[in-house]
Image (tube, rainbow, N blue to C red):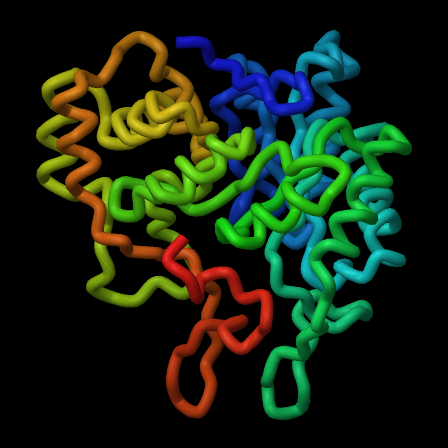
């Protein structure tokens, strides 16, 4: 199996990358450096992660030591306060400045829900309610298309978009989304959305493939994927870790995957998935773990209850089946 995915615009994207969500400043530079030394050639970033400057420092050091820019695939994302068409170009320019790069390989709309424009990344009123902006996704997308025209990014795509939102951009946009990055793991297999995107020629990237046990809003008693005895039984069969089996399961579905870690041994482990192949039977076993259990829906406390942060926004993506 090739570890490269050719996108709908002819750009080659490594199927396995390093995620940087929740990678703290002081840790992420070493994580990116370690990954590049081990052979990773795909780093997934986002402005809202607050660590792009440190990622950029690692990139510059490796580029200065002989790594060729064209051999590294860098993804970043347009944050929700920058959906207004007038803000899109400034947002990517700021990301490029932080990453100390001249262009991105892929730039995604991070969420279809938009926040009020301004300096605050999470604007709220005095009562703690998030302040939204009723953006027009097609207008935001048209501003993204201009970034490709300018050479600021080679490819553009989306993240956390549902099938209807992907279809709108495919049907009405001048440039078809290259990628839809969404939550995928054995408890949330996303087969309908993946099939829909692939039929449209849109590649899919799996984030939080290991179940994101350190997600900020995790509650006691929520499932811990990597401790699932059914999964660990399969991993023992192959002499691999549960994480390696999950990463392999994603790759064998022709889906790009970006496991996150800042631990050198785990970064290495997550990359060592090319020397085994899951049988069809074991792929089906892992498929059977699906619970339609979406773990990555940011929450806020409102009226004494934990509620989906963006559920009232007209572009909230999770109000339809896929």
Mark yes or no: residue 261 visible.
Answer: no
Q: Nearer the viewer, residue 303 or 315?
A: 315
Quadrant assignment, res 282: top left
Residue at horizontal 62 percent and vertical 32 percent from the top: 178
Q: Is residue 5 above or below residue 102?
A: above
Return the residue nearer the eye: 157 or 167.
167
Position of residue 135 measured from the top left corner of the image (x, y, whole percent) = 72, 66
Please provide percent x and percent y for residue 6: 58, 17
- Residue 293 figure quarter: bottom left
Q: Is residue 253 left or right of residue 124?
A: left
Residue 146 as seen in the image, left or right of residue 12? right
Q: In the shown orientation, is residue 188 left or right of residue 114?
A: left
Q: Residue at x 53, y 53 (%)?
A: 164
Could you say which quadrant of the image residue 105 lies in?
A: top right
Q: Is residue 163 above or below residue 115?
A: above
Return the x and y of residue 122 as percentages of the image width and height: 66, 70
Q: Quadrant of the N terminus?
A: top left
Give the side of residue 317 with respect to residue 105, left or right: left
Q: Is residue 252 above or below residue 224?
A: above
What residue lies at 57% left-to-right and 53% top-to-bottom? 165
Q: Residue furthest front?
A: 171
- Judge whether residue 79 can be spotted in this image: yes
Front-lying residue, 201 or 131: 201
Name the spot of residue 54 as percent of width and height, x first: 69, 39
Q: Residue at x 41, y 44 (%)?
A: 193
Figure label count: 0
């Amino acid at each position: 199996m090739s570890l490269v995915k050719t996108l709908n615009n002819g750009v080659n994207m490594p199927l396995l990358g390093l995620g940087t969500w929740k990678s703290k400043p002081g840790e992420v530079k070493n994580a990116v450096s370690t990954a590049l030394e081990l052979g990773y050639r795909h780093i997934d970033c986002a402005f809202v992660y607050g660590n792009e400057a440190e990622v950029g420092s690692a990139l510059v050091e490796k580029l200065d030591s002989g790594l060729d820019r064209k051999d590294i695939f860098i993804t970043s994302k347009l944050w929700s306060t920058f959906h207004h068409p007038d803000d899109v170009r400034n947002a990517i320019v700021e990301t490029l400045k932080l990453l100390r790069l001249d262009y991105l390989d892929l730039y995604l709309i991070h969420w279809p829900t938009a926040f009020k424009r301004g300096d605050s990344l999470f604007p709220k009123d005095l009562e703690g309610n998030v302040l939204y902006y009723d953006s027009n996704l097609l207008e935001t997308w048209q501003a993204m298309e201009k970034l490709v025209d300018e050479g600021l990014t080679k490819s553009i795509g989306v993240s956390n978009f549902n099938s209807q939102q992907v279809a709108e951009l495919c049907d009405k946009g001048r440039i078809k989304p290259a990628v839809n990055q969404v939550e995928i793991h054995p408890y949330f297999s996303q087969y309908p959305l993946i099939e829909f995107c692939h039929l449209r020629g849109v590649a899919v990237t799996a984030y939080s493939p290991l179940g994101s046990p350190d997600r900020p809003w995790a509650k006691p008693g929520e499932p811990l994927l990597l401790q699932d005895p059914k999964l660990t039984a399969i991993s023992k069969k192959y002499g691999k870790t549960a994480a390696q089996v999950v990463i392999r399961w994603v790759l064998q579905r022709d889906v790009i995957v970006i496991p996150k870690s800042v631990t050198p041994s785990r970064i290495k482990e997550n990359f060592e998935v090319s020397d085994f192949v899951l049988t069809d039977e074991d792929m089906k076993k892992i498929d059977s773990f699906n619970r339609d259990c979406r773990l990555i829906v940011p929450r806020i406390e409102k009226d004494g209850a934990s509620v989906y942060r963006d559920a009232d926004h007209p572009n909230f993506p999770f109000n339809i089946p896929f």
